Image (spheres, rainbow, N blue to C red):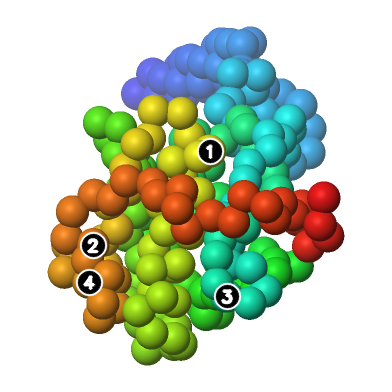
């Protein structure tokens, strides 16, 4: 009985040894020593934030707040159209060196996209409490947005302005935005052309 027990013991040792050799010789995916960082692949999608820019024209109030004048700027031309619209509006709302900044700080662009030749943008409503002025100021604000988008994006003829993602009767309290609005060049002072530094040209 003891001989059979010893024989079984050595048989198990032999089996385990053979299995160990097989496992060790099986090719592993990667045996490099040391910790591994993230694997980079050439096929990984990359959003490009830099690259060739294209010039755009912002329509912003003149220093007297009477008419709209042209101010040159640039945006990333490699971005999707929706992002280019947001870039354009961000410059219109916040760019330094504008003749007479119109829009208050903290303008929120909730959404922006183009559909069926219409730019559809959604703004946060907080600006309504901060934008000073009456009917004319409100008109300049609306057509500053509408004219800027129509002038810089081929195929966009009108702009629909939403407030907090919903249709609204008025931009603030005077100018109707219940429907998409076409550009109106009558607000533009064609005699004044300025670059983004604010210098006359």
Determine whether the residue tagged by mark 1 lies in a helix, strand or loop.
helix
Camera-nearest label, 2 or 3: 3
Q: Earlier in the sequence, mark 4 or mark 2?
A: 4
Q: Tell me whether circle 2 and circle 3 mark residues in contact (CB < 8 Å).
A: no
Image location (x, y in percent) of residue 116: 25, 31
Image location (x, y in percent) of residue 65: 57, 75
The quadrant holding residue 108 is bottom left
Mark 1, residue position: 152
Camera-nearest label, 4 or 3: 3
Determine whether the residue tagged by mark 3 lies in a helix, strand or loop.
loop
Q: How far apart are marks 4 and 3 (CA)?
A: 21 Å
Q: How far apart are marks 2 and 1 (CA)?
A: 21 Å
Neighbour tally class for label 2: few under 14, some 14-19, many 20 plus, Cα within 10 Å: some
Neighbour tally class for label 4: few under 14, some 14-19, many 20 plus, Cα within 10 Å: some
Q: Tell me whether circle 4 and circle 2 mark residues in contact (CB < 8 Å).
A: yes
Mark 4, residue position: 170
Determine whether the residue tagged by mark 4 lies in a helix, strand or loop.
loop
Q: Which of 24 and 173 is in front in this view?
A: 173
The answer to whether 138 is drawn above or below residue 15 in the figure is below
Mark 3, residue position: 65
Determine whether the residue tagged by mark 2 lies in a helix, strand or loop.
loop
Mark 2, residue position: 177
Q: Distance between the residues labelled 1 and 3?
A: 23 Å
The quadrant holding residue 78 is top right
Q: Earlier in the sequence, mark 4 or mark 1?
A: 1
Q: Distance between the residues labelled 4 and 1?
A: 25 Å
Say the numbered circle drawn on residue 138. none
């Amino acid at each position: 009985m003891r001989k059979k027990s010893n024989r079984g013991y050595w048989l198990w040792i032999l089996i385990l040894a053979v299995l160990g050799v097989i496992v060790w010789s099986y090719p592993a995916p990667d045996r490099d020593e040391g910790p591994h960082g993230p694997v980079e692949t050439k096929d990984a999608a990359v959003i490009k934030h830099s690259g060739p820019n294209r010039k755009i024209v912002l329509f912003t109030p003149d220093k007297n707040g009477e008419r709209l004048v042209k101010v040159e700027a640039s945006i990333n031309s490699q971005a999707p159209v929706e992002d280019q619209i947001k870039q354009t509006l961000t410059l219109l709302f916040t760019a330094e060196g504008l003749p007479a900044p119109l829009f208050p700080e903290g303008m929120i662009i909730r959404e922006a996209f183009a559909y069926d030749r219409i730019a559809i943008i959604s703004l946060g409503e907080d600006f309504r409490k901060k934008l000073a002025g009456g009917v004319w100021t409100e008109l300049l604000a609306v057509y500053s947005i509408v004219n800027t988008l129509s002038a810089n994006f081929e195929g966009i003829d009108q702009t629909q302005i939403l407030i907090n993602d919903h249709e609204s009767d008025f931009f603030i309290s005077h100018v109707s935005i219940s429907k998409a609005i076409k550009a109106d060049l009558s607000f533009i002072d064609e005699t004044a052309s300025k670059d983004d530094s604010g210098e006359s040209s």
